[in-house]
Image (cartoon, rainbow, N blue to C red):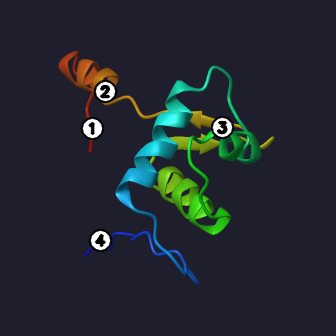
Amino acid sequence: MVSKTVFRPKNVLRYPRLDTVLMVEEAIQKAEEYPTKAELMRSLPKKIMYQTFNTIIDYLEYSGKILVDKDGSIVWIWDPEGIRKLKEKGLIVK
């Protein structure tokens, strides 16, 4: 039996609302350069708690939508359209 890891952050006082997660996703996608956490947080249209922000970043990294580089740069990597095109060309996905 294969067990699947579930995203469960510890010691979370508040879980982010969906609109807040989407706001952070959009800010990462639209960034012209790869922002650090501090730069990204300052660029958000609404202020959010730092713990909530970190929970969102952890979730996005866990779900495979972003990578956080060694220098702290956040890179958006999620590309479902590109994956669909690769599958049509014969990419085998497990």
What amino acid is found at the position of numbered circle 1 in the picture?
Answer: Val
- Choose the circle earlier in sequence order: 3 or 2: 3
Residue 51: percent from left, percent from top:
63, 68
Residue 54: percent from left, percent from top:
62, 61
Q: Counting other residues with Cα less than 10 Å from the Cα at mark 1, is it few (<14), some (14-19), or many (20 or more)? A: few
The answer for how far apart the CA atoms under marks 3 and 4 are is: 40 Å
Q: Is mark 1 on a helix, strand or loop?
A: loop
Tag shown at residue 43: 3
Specify whether 16 is left or right of 31: left
Nearer to us of marks 4 and 2 is 2
Residue at image mark 4:
2
Q: Counting other residues with Cα less than 10 Å from the Cα at mark 4, is it few (<14), some (14-19), or many (20 or more)? A: few
Q: Residue at x 54, y 35 (%)?
A: 27
- Choose the circle earlier in sequence order: 1 or 4: 4
Residue at image mark 2:
83
- Choose the circle earlier in sequence order: 3 or 4: 4
Q: Residue at x 32, y 74 (%)?
A: 3
What amino acid is found at the position of numbered circle 2 in the picture?
Answer: Ile
Q: What element carries label 3?
A: helix
- Asked if 81 appears above or below 72 in the picture, the reply is above
- Choose the circle earlier in sequence order: 3 or 1: 3
